[in-house]
Image (cartoon, helix red, strand yellow):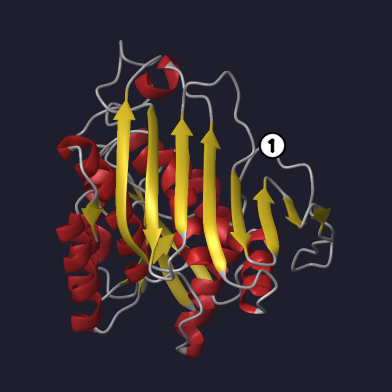
Amino acid sequence: MYRAAIIGCGAIHRLHANALQTIPNAQLTAVVDNIKYRAEDAAEMYGCPMYVDYHDVLSDESIDVVHICTPHHLHYSMTMDALEAGKHVLTEKPIATRVSDAEAMVSKAVQVGRRLGVTFQNRYNPNSRRAKELLEEGVLGDILGLKGLVIWHRNESYYNSEDWRGSWDLEGGGVLINQAIHTVDLMQWLGGPVTSVSGQIATHALSDFIEVEDMASGFLKFANGASGVFFATNDFSANCPVEVEIHGTKGSLIVRGDDLLLNGELVDIQSVTGQTVKNKSYWGLGHQDLISSFYTALESNSREYVPGEEGLKALAIIKGFYHSALKGKPIEL
């Protein structure tokens, strides 16, 4: 039984807490938030002790795993402290806001012999998993290109609800590092390593109340010779299904919302429970499976989870887009 603590009791922590309730070898032992009422509410909901200082759970030797569900700029320092204290860590995305910090986190986990996982839950959507299997089976032949689209809606109230949102220092960017990083991760997970990127960013509809970008476009070169195009915005009036298309010498594979299409034909996808998956509002309900896989990996000593190295890959691509937009030229990764 792995005893877990969740640091950060904002909206996302419930997905972690609810998942922990169903995992046989995990127990939610504590919740932490420096805003006391948030910690109190979470403690009452999940029937566990609460703290306002995360160092209190790090000094508790009975706690084995820490979930980091805090604002982006805190992921690095809290993860490093938790690893130093001998805890396994599962952090929300992005792994960090700087590539050098992410590299240090990955190295620290190896140094202390603990697991570092990153929450890229969309890898665990049934259509994403089946797409990965089909690609590994070679149904598309050689991959020629990939396309990623994220067309979502965020408004002033969303950014005003948390003081870290919309800030370069605290959020680390806008639509790229917060919303679209999941799609960038899927592109590199399905298409293989990315060797260079070029990108542009802009702030349009949200310019009056954020300093970061609300729209981004980019071009990616993959190690296998494929090219990728990418577009993301928070300026639309609704949250559309995310789309990733892979084009190969034998046809195309499209991951769109809940669906998977192979050469224009809908692929029948079954969930892990055997039930057909459909009718999600837009994208990604894979936290349960991702978190469960992390605890399975702890027990079996396997690599069947999303390790810190994968978080580092996605962050490097995102930061490459930002640097390219700043310098006006492609960036080698």
Q: Is residue 295 left or right of residue 58?
A: right
Residue 101 in the image, given as x and y percentages of width and height: 17, 59
Residue closest to the eye, 36 or 283: 283
Residue closest to the eye, 254 or 286: 254
Q: Quadrant of the C terminus?
A: bottom left
* Outermost residue to the top: 208
Residue 166 to residue 157: above or below: below
| Residue 169 can be seen in this image | no
Q: Is residue 253 left or right of residue 178?
A: right
Give the residue displayed 32% in from the left and 46% down from the top. 70
> Residue tagged by mark 1?
281
Give the residue displayed 49% in from the left and 57% down from the top. 187
Residue 268 in the image, given as x and y percentages of width and height: 84, 61
Residue 305 in the image, given as x and y percentages of width and height: 48, 73
Where disc 1 sits, the SS reads loop
Residue 302 to residue 240: above or below: below
Give the residue displayed 26% in from the left and 84% down from the top. 113
Q: Quadrant of residue 29?
A: bottom left
